[in-house]
Image (cartoon, grey):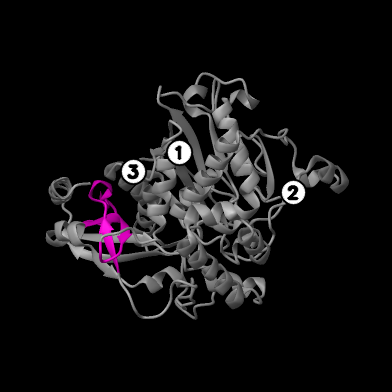
């Protein structure tokens, strides 16, 4: 954007935020450990921040989830600076946090060039490449989270869940109804919106779906959603955790992404074609590219040591590198939608993801894999419509059915071999991300499951 247009957009956003009662703006980014970081400015400094940014050390690109620091071939140490450049159009007043707004940022260097380890820039670049195929991505993250009371004693004590079940029940809803009222009201008021909310399967677990956004807004909304959940919880003396697993041995929290592709004629290419389940050739090729890259993608979408306590068979977490219509054990679940709604509703769900994932890195990597499928004109294998774990191992091998990596170490090895993801991210971002994965494996890999869960429970 030219400087004059940038200044006008900042001024317009500042007026919009002021009219909503905003006094302070949190400038937000997500690091390679999946933690959302913020720097805050009073509203009267927002326009200046849009023009010149707010400083942040490059070392945050190699922070681990426990706030320890590793290094990569390109990053590490106390020198250098990046500028957090808020996107004025994406700044969102937070209804559950009166007086506050959240603005996602891009990172630049001090010369005004894109910082090569900026996750948001990476995602937007991949979306721009997708646009060169005449396709626009629409989608949303579907979030599961734990709600409960954090104990006041030692940090390793288990929290008290806000509901004990039964799963999906009206009984559980009654326990969390006051929180739900505040949360849904806030999301509707601020324009995020709500598709559905319900108690989930695990103890204290809830799920929230929001309307689909377009392009980079898919990831931006994820930041707003998490902050709104935490603020609504705080108003009732509760805390929320988006950690992959909150209690060792129980079902964990997913962060599934639903996406569809729309062409320049305004048509959803996941419907109305002659390919599998009504996909067009473009939709099939994109899906096949994602499927082919899934083993390496797993290090991006399930990047925590704790992720692999969740990503197991029989937990509907999508641990199998297969696709299938409405198959919730498949990493790629194809959703046609109800008859009559399919031109708008048909979409692809990637289930093998949790909220330890940086939503920008995950989105960008998925799109990069889909573009690879488009470029290579890939075709899908036969769908898998049964639980792969119920198929005898010899039959699975004959069908080419693979389980996704079952540990972070195995996922790292797949990622290390992926020229696709390295080339898409670029060496600086890829090596920084890989360094954080290796660093967290070294810190947490030897812990017993309960200790590992406690170490991650309140980091997401």
Residue 79's disc number: none
Q: Which residue, given by chain and number where applicable, does mark 1 sit on?
A: 130
Q: Which residue, given by chain and number where applicable, does mark 3 sit on?
A: 192
Q: Position of residue 126 (x, y in %)?
A: 44, 46
Q: Is residue 24 left or right of residue 74?
A: left
Q: Answer with mark 3 or mark 2, whichever residue precedes in sequence.
A: 3
- 158, above or below 5, in the image: below
Q: Answer with mark 3 or mark 1, whichever residue precedes in sequence.
A: 1
Q: Few, some or many C-alpha atoms within 10 Å of disc 1 (few <14, some 14-19, many ≥20)?
A: many
Q: Quadrant of residue 450?
A: bottom right
Please tell me whether residue 191 belongs to the stretch shown in magenta: no
Q: Which residue, given by chain and number where applicable, does mark 2 sit on?
A: 402
- The secondary element bearing badge 2 is classed as loop
Q: CA distance from mark 2 to mark 1?
A: 28 Å
Q: Nearer the viewer, mark 3 or mark 1?
A: 1
Q: Position of residue 97 (x, y in %)?
A: 27, 57
- The secondary element bearing badge 3 is classed as loop
Q: Few, some or many C-alpha atoms within 10 Å of disc 3 (few <14, some 14-19, many ≥20)?
A: many
């Amino acid at each position: 954007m030219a400087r004059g247009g940038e200044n006008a957009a900042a001024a317009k956003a500042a007026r919009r935020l002021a009219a909503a009662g905003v006094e302070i703006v949190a400038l937000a980014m997500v690091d390679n450990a999946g933690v959302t970081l913020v720097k805050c400015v009073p509203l009267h400094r927002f326009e200046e921040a849009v023009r010149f940014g707010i400083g942040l050390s490059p070392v945050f690109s190699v922070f681990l989830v426990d706030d320890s620091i590793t290094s990569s071939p390109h990053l590490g140490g106390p020198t250098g600076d990046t500028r957090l450049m808020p996107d004025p159009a994406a700044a969102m007043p937070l209804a559950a946090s009166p007086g506050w707004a959240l603005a996602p940022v891009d990172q630049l260097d001090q010369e005004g060039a894109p910082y090569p380890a900026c996750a948001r820039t990476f995602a937007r670049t991949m979306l721009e490449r997708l646009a060169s195929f005449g396709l626009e991505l629409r989608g949303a993250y579907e979030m599961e989270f734990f709600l409960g009371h954090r104990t006041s004693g030692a940090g390793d004590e288990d929290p008290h869940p806000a509901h004990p079940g039964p799963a999906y029940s009206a009984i559980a809803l009654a326990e969390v109804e006051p929180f739900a009222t505040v949360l849904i009201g806030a999301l509707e008021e601020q324009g995020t919106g709500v598709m559905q909310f319900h108690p989930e399967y695990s103890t204290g677990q809830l799920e929230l779906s929001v309307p689909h956004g377009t392009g980079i807004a898919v990831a931006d909304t994820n930041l707003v959603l998490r902050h709104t959940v935490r603020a609504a919880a705080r108003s009732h003396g509760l805390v929320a955790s988006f950690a992959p697993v909150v209690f060792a041995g129980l079902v964990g929290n997913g962060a599934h992404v639903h996406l569809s592709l729309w062409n320049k004629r305004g048509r959803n290419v996941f419907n109305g074609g002659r390919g599998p389940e009504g996909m067009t050739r473009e939709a099939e090729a994109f899906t096949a590219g994602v499927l082919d890259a899934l083993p390496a993608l797993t290090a991006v979408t399930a990047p925590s040591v704790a992720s692999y306590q969740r990503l197991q068979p029989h937990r509907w977490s999508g641990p199998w590198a297969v696709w299938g219509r409405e198959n919730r054990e498949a990493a790629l679940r194809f959703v046609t939608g109800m008859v009559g709604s399919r031109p708008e509703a048909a979409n692809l769900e990637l289930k093998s993801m949790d909220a330890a994932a940086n939503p920008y890195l995950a989105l960008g990597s998925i799109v990069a894999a889909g573009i690879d499928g488009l470029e290579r004109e890939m075709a899908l294998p036969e769908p898998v419509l049964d639980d792969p774990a119920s198929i005898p191992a010899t039959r699975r091998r004959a069908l080419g059915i693979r389980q996704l990596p079952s540990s972070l170490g195995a996922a790292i090895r797949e990622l290390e071999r992926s020229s696709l993801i390295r080339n898409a991210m670029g060496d600086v971002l890829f090596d920084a991300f890989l360094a954080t994965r290796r660093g967290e494996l070294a810190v947490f890999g030897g812990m017993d499951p309960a200790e590992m869960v406690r170490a991650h429970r309140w980091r997401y």
